[in-house]
Amino acid sequence: MAMTADGKIATANRAVSSFGSRRDQAHLLQLRATADAVMAGARTTDSNPITLGPGPAKYRRLRLRHGLAEFNLRIIVSRSGTVNPKAEVFQRRFSPIIILTTRRATASRLRELRAVATEVRIYGAKEINFPRALRWLREKWGIKRLLCEGGGELNDALFRAGVVDQLHLTVCPKVFGGRTAPTIADGLGAGRLARAAHLALVSARRHDDEMFFVYHVLRK
Amino acid sequence: MAMTADGKIATANRAVSSFGSRRDQAHLLQLRATADAVMAGARTTDSNPITLGPGPAKYRRLRLRHGLAEFNLRIIVSRSGTVNPKAEVFQRRFSPIIILTTRRATASRLRELRAVATEVRIYGAKEINFPRALRWLREKWGIKRLLCEGGGELNDALFRAGVVDQLHLTVCPKVFGGRTAPTIADGLGAGRLARAAHLALVSARRHDDEMFFVYHVLRK
């Protein structure tokens, strides 16, 4: 995830959500080239022309050198099943797309999504049961390393479910400000320190005015 | 300012707002020892038992070595003048306390504040006119270097006013999450990239799992 120095991933009006350097964009593609699957929330895939794919040929060769499939699997998460079936991500058929949702998704929505996605799975009544969903993704699809690219609501749900192993964070040299500007972990959040995710800083690299961090999430 | 890796300065319910290491707390006192005055918003001084003072004798000696007064001046900012006159900060009389407010402050509130503060000044109708206020602070009180310690609303107002020269940022190894959790720059924020504050990274130091940054704010 890339964020500003004040922890924002977009401006308050959401008009600006792309602000990392070209190096940060390359860094994201390098990260994708280490993952079996790339995951994002429905608002992220709806509102951006993104494919969640591996990108240019050099990154696909990198994947093959890493012993991975040339194209990563793609996973879209929506508790209510409100995924836009016309979104850019569905226009590109290079790899399976799996949608995770809950019993809140109506039958008509499920039908619509099953027409565009490879598989649509229900995990949970109102909130996604991530431990179960990730177990299934590993068993059925062989996904051992999963890269989640946000948004903040999905990231927060994954942190609260205790299923995050690493955080790759880029801090960009800007301050957006804004009480309603989204951050890398929105949603409900932790109410007390004991519930917060505690991290260990594995690496901190500086390139020009950007910082690239890798954190490990400590088990409680 | 200290924030979590997801950009928060407190949990969503505000129950946890102190999470930096002892090193970070010492770092804050070292910073105060470089400033003529320390500034905070009224919600910050109301809800915390803080004095905005220089701290233990070693930091006061540091101030003297820096050619500064032994005790820094203290500034509290409140657009509406709703500063609790019983707050801890007023119990300690080691240095002048200046309150900056706007014409939104009622006469009775101003009277109450003038009884506890050294000086109460009105700058602006609804929002503080920071360029004018800072000019007066320099001329009347000789304040050349001012350290603002938040909260996020005040920081954002200072960034939007274009009066911030440096950002000293500690990133702590935690993730709080939470859409409503405060960040170092809340308030209105920037609507477009051109309005955001653009920074240059002056230094990045790592101590254990914490990162200490100094940024310069670039002039537009």
Image (spheres, coloured by chain):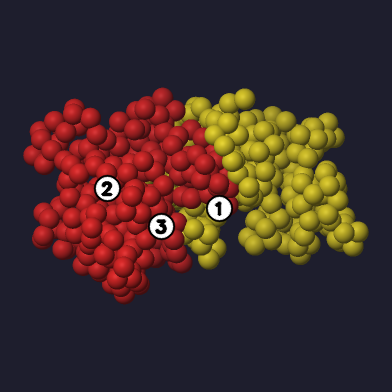
Chain colours: A yellow, B red
Horizontal and vertical percent for residue B88? Answer: 32, 44
Q: CA distance from mark 2 to mark 1?
A: 30 Å
Q: Where on the picture, by quarter, is residue A110?
A: bottom right
Instruction: Please indicate whether residue B44 sits to the left or right of residue A57 in the image.
Output: left
Label 2 and label 1 in one chain: yes
Circle 3 is placed at which residue position?
B153
Quadrant for the C terminus of chain B, please. bottom left
Horizontal and vertical percent for residue A43? Answer: 67, 58
Circle 1 is placed at which residue position?
B180
Q: Nearer the viewer, residue B175 or B182?
A: B182
Q: Amino acid at mark 1?
A: Thr
Viewer-nearest of labels 2 and 1? Answer: 2
Q: Secondary structure at mark 2?
A: helix
Q: Amino acid at mark 2?
A: Phe
Q: Is residue B186 visible?
A: yes
Going 83% across and 54% down the picture, which residue do you hit?
Answer: A104
Circle 2 is placed at which residue position?
B90
Horizontal and vertical percent for residue A190? Answer: 59, 40
Q: Is residue A185 visible?
A: no
Chain ID for label 1? B
Q: CA distance from mark 3 to mark 1?
A: 13 Å
Q: Is residue A177 above or below residue A36?
A: below
Q: Residue furthest bottom?
A: B125
